[in-house]
Amino acid sequence: MKYHPVDNALFRLNRDNFRKMMKPDAVAFFHAGDFVHRSSDQVYPFRQNADFFYLTGIEQEKCVLMLFPNSPNPELREVLFLQPSNEHISLWEGDRISKKRANDISGVERVCWLSEFEAMQKEAMVYATCVYLNTPENPRGMRGKYSQDLEFALKLKDQYPAHHYLRANPLLGNLRMVKSIPEQELIRKAVDITGKAIQRVMKFVKPGVGEYEVEAEIIHEYIRNRAGGHAFYPVVASGANACVLHYNANNRMCKDGDLLLIDTGAEYANYAGDISRTIPVNGRFSQRQKKVYDACLRVMKFARELLVPGNNLSEYHKEVMHFMEKELIALGLFTSADLKNQDTENLLVKKYFPHGTSHFLGLDVHDEGHRFVRFQPGMVLTCEPGIYIREEGIGVRIENDLMITENGPVDLSFDLPLETEEIEEIMNS
């Protein structure tokens, strides 16, 4: 890990909060992520299971956490199991986390080797009446069909069919949606690093620069600020590429007169930033580009004021869509009469603004949360309206990260320029 050590008070708090939600005489099991093989003996970069990191802070594969608050055997109440190191592992990959180091990181007092897990799990199952299993669930789809948690769940239910099984995911999801103070600080750090990268790009971009060179500037700024890298693969889209929502080829040359849409986020201590800016490659917006940009910015300013306790994504997005319709009419993209006569199955606004305005942000860039949950203080969401006019080759997206509070939304990206005049000033300084 490149980031500064995180106080284990965060992970102890997270476990305490989860324990308070457990039923009496229940045991819970959580598995770390595993390496995904790329080819032969090559693997993709390891990324810890977000739930496991949330509860332990451990960034190592082949680990298990067992929580059994009411166990009659005190030694089973909270146990972290690790894979030990050996000579071969030390030579090829470096030493694994020691028991002492695992205790320092997680705050879990009882740390054992993974070889002890089976016996302790069997004893726990004798005492427990119900079991929390952390199956991979998300409204956007399964987080991994063959995750360690899912494989363990299927095996355990086969071995112990008479136990009562419960889902850990709804409990963890509710906890992860509302960020504690330490989590808020980690997200602020991720957002701050993301902002630094975008400001770096604003000073770097000019006609003839490759999208890939812009991507290189971004990752340079991330790594030098101790980020782990990208929270998601960055969008660096010039000209008509900006109308492709998840464009990531990043291989075109930026031309004079183009707009450049950048959507990127640093990952710091596994927490994500997510910011978008659209800038003129030559340092000056054309009249039409400015008009489209300012329309999108007005939508953003309207939308972010709706990120308040009690609202939800479903209702919020409908309000934003209605506001966006007015802006698109003003841009001459359709008329009020067209709006009245539109096909309700193919809304005109969706042609130019096809995606949602916000999503939850945290340990995943699209974090725990869904469109019907009511906003609460401590939740962090993006605000990212976009206008994409494919027939004109113009794509604009503006995105900041905001935290919901009782006194209104707090913009975590507040110091990053939004207005066209500010952007042009930086680019021409």
Image (cartoon, rainbow, N blue to C red):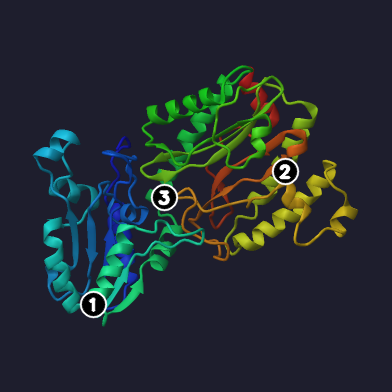
Measure how far apart labels 2 and 1 are at the Cα level: 57 Å
**Which residue type does callout 1 highlight?**
Tyr
Residue 7 in picture, x, y percent from top left: 28, 47
Q: Are marks 2 and 3 in contact (CB under 8 Å)?
A: no
| Number of residues whose C-alpha sits closer than 10 Å to that of mark 2, classed few (under 14), some (14–19) or many (20 or more) | some
Q: Quadrant of residue 146?
A: bottom left
Q: Is residue 413 visible?
A: no
Q: Nearer the viewer, mark 2 or mark 3?
A: 3
Residue located beneath label 2 in the image: 298
Q: Residue at x 30, y 58 (%)?
A: 148
Horizontal relation, residue 367 to residue 10: left or right: right
Task: Identify residue for label 3.
Answer: 363
Image position of 74 with respect to 101: above or below: below
Q: Tell me residue 335's x, y (percent).
A: 88, 49
* Amino acid on which disc 2 is placed: Arg
Q: Most extreme residue toward the bottom, as rendered?
A: 162
Q: Circle 1 is placed at which residue position?
A: 160
Q: Secondary structure at mark 1?
A: loop
First of labels 3, 1 by sequence position = 1
